[in-house]
Image (cartoon, helix red, strand yellow):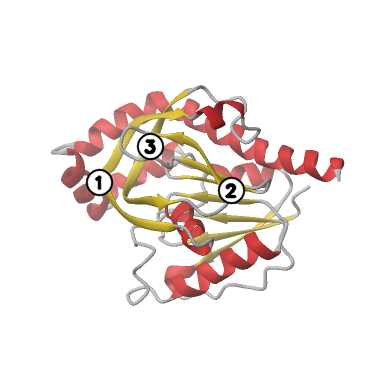
């Protein structure tokens, strides 16, 4: 049972979203640390679950965002020293990779907007991705990628552009390069954020937001189902491992 969860947030408009809802459904108290606002990372011992969100910064931009150093150290402490569930989203996947001595670099091509991801052979049989469709339509927004996975990591899904789209490490660690935390209200907020509209147009061409919004109306039920399946698999897998122990 998750009683208290911690989330690392990196931008005002990159909140826990659906994963916050899933945690509250578990009866968990959720504490959100706004790292980009200078909020300090608390002691990790009281928490049962760590959620690390996305953001526009890159994992190597520690001069511009010095709090990334402490965040990576906290992620390493959580994943190496504590046997508790972790879920990372987009930047969260990349921070996890660096914290565990993998490598992240610029992608050969950015992925922005809805795109296709397919489960790998490992993903088709893995308990973390059990119940997912073999082919997924997901929301992407990244120009960096995992270039070398950490020791012991498994790649559970890939796209034509990016090899690591879902990654697991052991029984308690799961992360995605794509965004399965999005809620309709969050995408609707992008219409009022000029920088987001500029980023979308730069990546996808003119009027990109209108196209993303139109597809999101069709995709959101599947996005929620996909995120819920992975979240519940992560929690259920931990219960199975603990029961077997």
Name the residue that disc number 1 marks.
Answer: 108
Give the quarter of the image for residue 37: bottom left
**Foreground residue, 49 or 176?**
176
The count of marks equals: 3
Residue, disc 2: 20
Q: CA distance from mark 1 to mark 2?
A: 32 Å
- Of residues 36 and 203, the one drawn nearer to the viewer in this rendering: 203
Using the image as rendered, state which of residue 42 and residue 29 is in the foreground. 42
Q: Spatial distance from mark 2 to mark 3, Cα to Cα?
A: 18 Å
> Residue at the location (32% across, 48% down)?
142
Q: What residue is at 61 percent from the left and 27 percent from the top?
A: 125
Q: Residue at x 62, y 32 (%)?
A: 126
Q: Residues within 10 Å of mark 2 (few under 14, many from 20)?
A: many
Tell me, yes or no, whether the two marked residues, 2 and 3, touch with CB atoms within 8 Å.
no
Q: Which mark is residue 139?
A: 3
Secondary structure type for disc 1: strand
Residue drawn at the location 67% of the way across and 51% of the way down: 85
In the foreground, 141 or 130: 130
User: Residue 228, image x and y in percent?
Assistant: 59, 34
């Amino acid at each position: 049972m998750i009683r208290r969860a911690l989330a690392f947030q990196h931008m005002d408009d990159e909140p826990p979203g659906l994963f916050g809802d899933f945690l509250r459904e578990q009866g968990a108290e959720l504490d959100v640390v706004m790292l980009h606002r200078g909020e300090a990372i608390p002691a990790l011992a009281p928490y049962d679950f760590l959620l690390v969100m996305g953001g526009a910064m890159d994992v190597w931009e520690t001069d511009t965002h010095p709090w990334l150093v402490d965040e990576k150290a906290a992620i390493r402490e959580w994943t190496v020293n504590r046997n508790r569930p972790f879920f990372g989203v987009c930047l969260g996947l990349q921070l996890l990779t660096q914290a565990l001595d993998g490598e992240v670099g610029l992608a050969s091509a950015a992925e922005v907007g809805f795109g296709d991801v397919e489960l790998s052979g490992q993903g088709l049989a893995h308990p973390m991705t059990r119940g997912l469709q073999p082919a997924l339509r997901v929301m992407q927004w990244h120009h960096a990628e995992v270039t070398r996975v950490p020791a012991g990591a498994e790649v559970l899904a890939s796209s034509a552009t990016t090899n690591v789209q879902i990654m697991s490490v052991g029984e308690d660690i799961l992360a995605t390069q794509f965004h399965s935390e999005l809620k309709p209200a969050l995408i609707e907020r992008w219409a009022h954020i000029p920088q987001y509209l500029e980023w979308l147009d730069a990546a996808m061409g003119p009027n990109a937001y209108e196209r993303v919004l139109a597809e999101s109306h069709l995709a959101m039920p599947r996005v929620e189902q996909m995120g819920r399946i992975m979240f519940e698999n992560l929690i259920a897998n931990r219960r199975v491992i603990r029961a077997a122990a």
